[in-house]
């Protein structure tokens, strides 16, 4: 599996300098208000199975597990998985969080096994958008819920607009209408919109399986 994930890895695992950069950003990635808001909206219930795509340091995973949900947190970065693996040990119920190597294009879960799928600031890293939506459609259970959110740095109202407005130029463009249509092609009820969550503009796609 290692070689398969190499081509999906981004800057996370490219050296000490990059790791230090991520550590400096730790407060935001450790305790993200946006991730908490996403979990509040998708509302995982006790005993439900949640997939957190691009989990990073786990703010969404920890929040979902605090509600009693069983979370599989996937990330292509060994560094991020190590951080989250250590973090889970200090949770009230560490067994509720499983950390796996994985990407949206290749989800390490069986068909129909997941009640809730979420991703926060991850879509722009997906190298195969159509394949990623197909994988989500494969693993989602009937009447499952999907919530994908990326911060909209192109919006002048975003606090980091000046420095991050072109961040999608060399990544996957997050077009909510395109993603909405892809979900609809797999039989989901879906909506895509630009809204504000936790005080920042975001691109949001919400989908429900039949």
Image: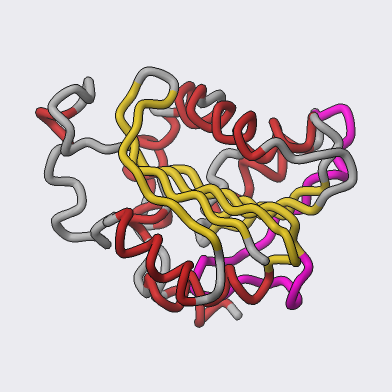
Task: Determine which quarter of the picture holds residue 138.
Answer: bottom right
Task: Determine which quarter of the picture holds residue 195.
Answer: top left
Q: Which of 172 and 83 is in front in this view?
A: 172
Q: In this view, does 61 lie to the left or right of 75?
A: right
Residue 92 within the magenta-colored segment of the rendering: yes
Find residue 36 and report its horizontal and vertical position in percent: 59, 27
Find residue 191 and report its horizontal and vertical position in percent: 43, 52
Q: Residue at x 68, y 61 (%)?
A: 100
Q: Is residue 18 left or right of residue 191?
A: left
Q: Nearer the viewer, residue 129 or 126?
A: 129
Q: Residue at x 44, y 32 (%)?
A: 23
Find residue 175 and report its horizontal and vertical position in percent: 27, 56
Task: Determine which quarter of the picture holds residue 78.
Answer: bottom right
Q: What color scheme is it? A: secondary structure
Q: Which residue is drawn at 51% across and 62% down?
A: 76
Find residue 57 and report its horizontal and vertical position in percent: 57, 39
**Please, what is the dominant secondary structure of the magenta stretch?**
loop
Residue 9 within the magenta-colored segment of the rendering: no
Q: What stretch is highlighted in magenta?
A: 91-113
Residue 160 against residue 81 in the figure, above or below: above
């Amino acid at each position: 599996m290692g070689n398969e994930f190499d081509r999906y890895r981004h800057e996370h695992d490219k050296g000490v300098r990059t790791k230090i950069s991520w550590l400096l950003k730790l407060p935001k990635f450790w305790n993200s208000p946006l991730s908490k808001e996403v979990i509040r909206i998708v509302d995982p219930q006790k005993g439900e199975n949640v997939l957190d795509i691009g989990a990073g340091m786990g703010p969404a995973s920890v929040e979902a597990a605090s509600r009693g949900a069983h979370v599989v947190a996937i990330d292509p970065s060994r560094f991020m998985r190590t951080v989250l693996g250590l973090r889970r040990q200090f949770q009230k119920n560490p067994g509720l969080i499983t950390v796996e190597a994985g990407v949206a294009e290749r989800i390490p879960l069986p068909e129909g096994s997941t009640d809730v799928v979420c991703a926060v600031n991850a879509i722009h890293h997906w190298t195969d958008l159509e394949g990623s939506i197909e994988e989500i459609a494969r693993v989602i259970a009937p009447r499952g819920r999907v919530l994908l959110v990326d911060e909209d740095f192109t919006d002048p109202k975003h606090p980091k607009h000046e420095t991050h407005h072109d961040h999608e130029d060399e990544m996957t463009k997050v077009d909510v209408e395109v993603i909405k249509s892809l979900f609809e092609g797999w039989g989901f009820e879906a909506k895509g919109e630009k809204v504000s969550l936790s005080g920042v503009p975001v691109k949001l796609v919400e989908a429900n399986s039949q």
